[in-house]
Amino acid sequence: MTSAASAVRAALPRLLTTLAPYQAAVVRIGTAGTWGAYLLREWPNRRVLYGDRSAWSAELNGRLLSETHAFTALSWSDGRWWFEAVYLLALLSALALALGWRTRASAVLFALTVLSLQNRNVFLGDGGDNLVHLMAIYLVFTRCGRVWSLDARRRARRPGKDPSAWGEPRAVVDALAAMLHNGAMLVIAVQVVLVYATAGWYKVQGARWQDGTAVFYPLKLEYFTPWPELSGLLGGSLLVTFVLTYGTVVMQVGFPFSLAARRLKNVLLAVMVVEHLAIAVLLGLPFFSLAMVSADAVFLPTAFLVGTQERLAERWARRTAGRRERRLPEPGGEQAGEPAEEPVGGPGD
């Protein structure tokens, strides 16, 4: 009991600090960017999908909401201009959250607009919308604007007081906010693990996944073949479909167990990111894949993210330094390639 209490006391300072700020930033940028890109793509179809022209009418949706009690601001009015305002607000909040501008307020607004549009027509989506739905709620409780945001840039230019100098009440609030952030990041990680675990174990029970032919069938459906030649090439090889089918099951079932081994986890994470990108191209599901990759980012190594930031910063510094050198005049005040002016009072006078 004494050892357990000492362990808790030793871990408490770490729990009261904001953990995984870089992972939270990547989840923020990825989730908001995915939803914003989806809304932009569906801009011409917005009224058919979520507005007054939708086949799923406001009356039908109202009956469903009376049973599910789900939130949507679009239930307050079925007018076109109210819908247009909510849709535009959803786009702006996605942009603000991706950029990290007033992150706390934009995260709340983003979550409300995501719920408003998705709960207006629950029959749309490809699975990625469910993940965006959940991530939007979880991000409200995180400090996802600590790095890689306009808020972080503003704080760097005008640093505020240290929480310890605020006094005890504000320091306690800051500690509670840090614990809330850490808890939300843990929930995001658990959510991703549940997605892969449930998907993997359900696949294990399927006959097509057991005989290694499950990947073959979507490659033959017109809806999932934006590149028919490439899909036909992959689907025409029994060995390729067998490896892809069993490889998918092994990765999804094994990923939760790989968290105990950091190197194995990183390898599986990289493979799953490649798999999602392949799904985006082969099956024509870009927003589903982007949503999954954004959620997977919670497991990215901090050293990798920090190293990427440093490399990009060094490259940007070299680029800006090169531009400045090209703009500087030649020694002696002469521009390159221009003849020097003869001084007044020289031999030519």
Image (spheres, rainbow, N blue to C red):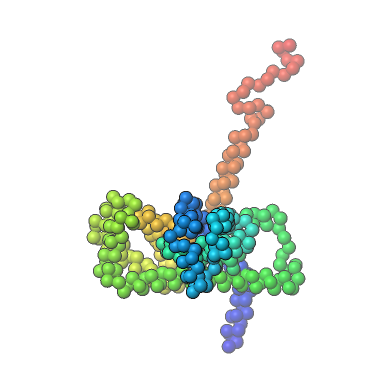
Residue 94 screen position, x and y as percent: 55, 57
User: Residue shown at 59%/61% (left/top)?
Assistant: 109
Residue 171: quarter of image: bottom right
Q: Quick one: which residue is furthest to the bottom in this view?
A: 1
**Camera-side residue: 124 or 205?**
124
**Can you say whether 278 is above or below 6 in the image?**
above
- Asked if residue 27 shows in the view, the reply is no
Q: Say if 105 sits above or below 42 in the image.
A: below
In depth, the one of 335 and 230 nearer the eye is 230
Q: Quadrant of the C terminus?
A: top right
Question: In the rendered image, which quarter contains the N terminus?
Answer: bottom right
The residue depicted at 41 percent of the width and 64 percent of the height is: 268
**Toward which corner of the image does residue 244 lie, by quadrant?**
bottom left
Q: Nearer the viewer, residue 35 or 20?
A: 35
The quadrant holding residue 79 is: bottom right
Q: Nearer the viewer, residue 348 or 103?
A: 103
- Please give the name of the residue rendered at 54% of the width and 68% of the height, measured from the top-left corner: 71
The x, y position of residue 47, in whole percent, is 48, 55
Q: Can I make out residue 93 in this image? A: yes
Q: Position of residue 340 (x, y in %)?
A: 66, 21
Residue closest to the far top: 349
How many discs mark residues in the rendered view?
A: 0
Q: Residue at x 46, y 68 (%)?
A: 192
- In the displayed structure image, the side of residue 198 where residue 20 appears, left or right: right
